[in-house]
Image (cartoon, grey):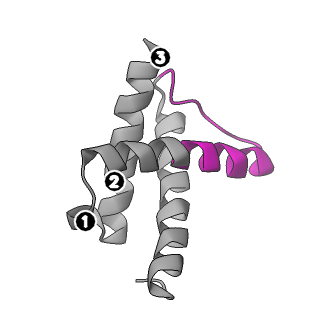
């Protein structure tokens, strides 16, 4: 059951991050889920540095926020690599 929740929360976090970064038109559902799950890992790494974190395998607001912040960081890095500048 945790994998299904992780896919849903990862997809929502990736979709929200792609909307904020203006990349929603170029990403599909699959890539939103991938960005959200990888973003969750990045967000947890950043969160541990500041003393907080969350899991997307059990739904919580903190887990969603952590995945969202990590997905934003991931999309920011991808923008820098692809375009040479931040949008």
Q: How many marks?
A: 3
Boundaries of the magenta span: 39-58
Q: Which quadrant would residue 23 be assigned to in this image? A: bottom left
Q: Residue at x 31, y 51 (%)?
A: 15
Displayed quadrant of residue 4:
top left
Determine the residue positioned at 20% across, 65% down.
25
Q: Residues within 10 Å of mark 1 (few under 14, many from 20)?
A: few
Q: Who is closer to the viewer here, 47 or 71?
A: 71
Outermost residue toward the left? 25
Q: Which mark is residue 26?
A: 1
Q: Classify 84 as above or below 64.
A: below
Is 53 magenta? The answer is yes
Relative horizontal placement of residue 27, taking residue 52 as reference (left or right):
left
- The residue that disc 2 covers is 16
- Labels 3 and 2 touching (C-beta < 8 A): no
Q: Position of residue 48 (x, y in %)?
A: 76, 44
State which tag comes first along the sequence, 1 or 3: 3
- Distance CA(mark 1)–CA(mark 3): 28 Å
Is residue 12 highlighted in magenta?
no
């Amino acid at each position: 059951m945790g994998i299904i929740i992780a896919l849903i929360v990862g997809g929502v976090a990736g979709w929200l991050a792609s909307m904020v970064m203006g990349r929603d038109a170029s990403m599909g559902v699959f890539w939103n889920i991938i960005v959200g799950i990888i973003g969750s890992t990045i967000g947890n790494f950043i969160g541990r540095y500041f003393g907080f974190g969350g899991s997307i395998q059990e739904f919580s607001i903190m887990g969603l926020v952590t995945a969202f912040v990590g997905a934003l960081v991931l999309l920011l890095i991808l923008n820098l690599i692809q375009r040479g500048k931040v949008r």
